[in-house]
Amino acid sequence: MIDENEIVDEQNQRILSNLSAYTVALVLIKHRHYEMAENKCAYLKVVEKAYIFLLKYVKKNKENQL
């Protein structure tokens, strides 16, 4: 799912960091509302995408790994 050879776009990581975009992914993961979700399958896909976003966000970037 995460390609180790994928090229990291440092400028995009910087922009996302300045926008605190990672907080949205963290909120989605932290606040588990699976039982209340109208469409559980769609909810799980969103949570999965949030995890993937975070993995790519911190990839090869020590500043984003704090």
Image (spheres, helix red, strand yellow):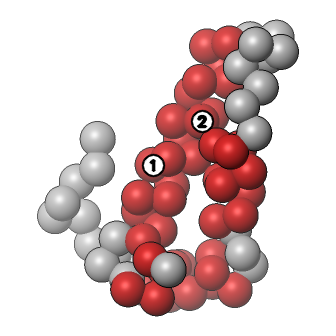
Q: SS for tag 1?
A: helix
Q: Amino acid at mark 2?
A: Val
As helix, strand or loop, the secondary structure at mark 2 comes to helix
Q: Amino acid at mark 1?
A: Ile
Q: Residues within 10 Å of mark 1 (few under 14, many from 20)?
A: some
- Taking the image as shown, residue 8 lies to the left or right of residue 4, namely right
Q: Which residue is mark 2?
A: 47
Residue contact at pointers 1 and 2, CB within 8 angstroms: no
Q: Earlier in the sequence, mark 1 or mark 2?
A: 2
Residue receiving disc 1: 52
Q: Residue furthest toward the left? A: 5
Q: Nearer the viewer, residue 57 or 15?
A: 57
What residue is drawn where x is 65% and y is 20%?
42
Eyeballing the image, is 7 above or below 11?
above
Q: Is residue 15 left or right of residue 56?
A: right
Q: Position of residue 54 (x, y in %)?
A: 50, 59
Count neighbours of disc 2 (C-alpha within 10 A) and say few if under 14, some if 14 to 19, many if 20 or more.
Answer: some
